[in-house]
Amino acid sequence: MLERIIALLFCFILGLASLGVAGWLGVSGDVIASVDGLFITLVALLTAAICFGYVGMQVQAALSPPSNAKKRR
């Protein structure tokens, strides 16, 4: 249980950091200044999407009611 919480916090923090990097590159103008800035921005946004997707799937799995694999007749 503790490992799952640590993984969720790590992914959430990594997602926020990735959004921060993309935002910083957008504010500083490096996105349109070079191809490298555009590539780094796209990688940061993809990393944020993957991390927040993982967090969202884990939260959805935790909130959904458990399904009974064996149904008795």
Image (spheres, rainbow, N blue to C red):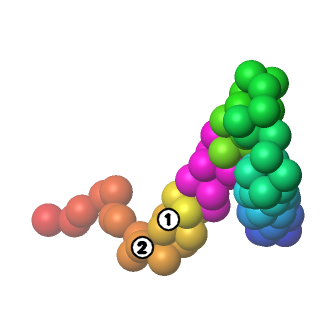
Instruction: Give the quadrant of residue 50.
Output: top right
Is residue 23 a member of the stretch shown in magenta? no
Report the quarter where the C terminus lies: bottom left
Does residue 10 appear to the left or right of 22 in the view shown? right
Report the quarter where the N terminus lies: bottom right
Asked whether the viewer can see residue 11, the reply is no
Does residue 39 appear to the left or right of 17 in the view shown? left
Q: Which residue is mark 2?
A: 64
Does residue 26 lie above or below 2 as drawn? above
Picture residue at 84% right of the left edge, 52% below the top: 28
Picture residue at 34% right of the left edge, 65% below the top: 68
Q: Secondary structure at mark 2?
A: loop
Q: Between residues 5 and 41, which one lies in front from this camera angle?
A: 41
Instruction: Give the quadrant of residue 24.
Output: bottom right
Picture residue at 55% right of the left edge, 63% below the top: 56
Is residue 54 a member of the stretch shown in magenta? yes
Q: Position of residue 40 (x, y in %)?
A: 78, 33
Q: Which residue is mark 1?
A: 61
Q: Which range of residues does the magenta coloring cover?
A: 46-55
Q: Measure the C-alpha gap from mark 1 to mark 2.
A: 5 Å
Q: Are circles 1 and 2 on residues that touch, CB within 8 Å?
A: yes
**Amino acid under disc 2:** Ser
Neighbor class of circle 2 (other Cα within 10 Å; few <14, some 14-19, many 20+) is few
Q: Position of residue 43 (x, y in %)?
A: 72, 34
Give residue 4's mark.
Answer: none
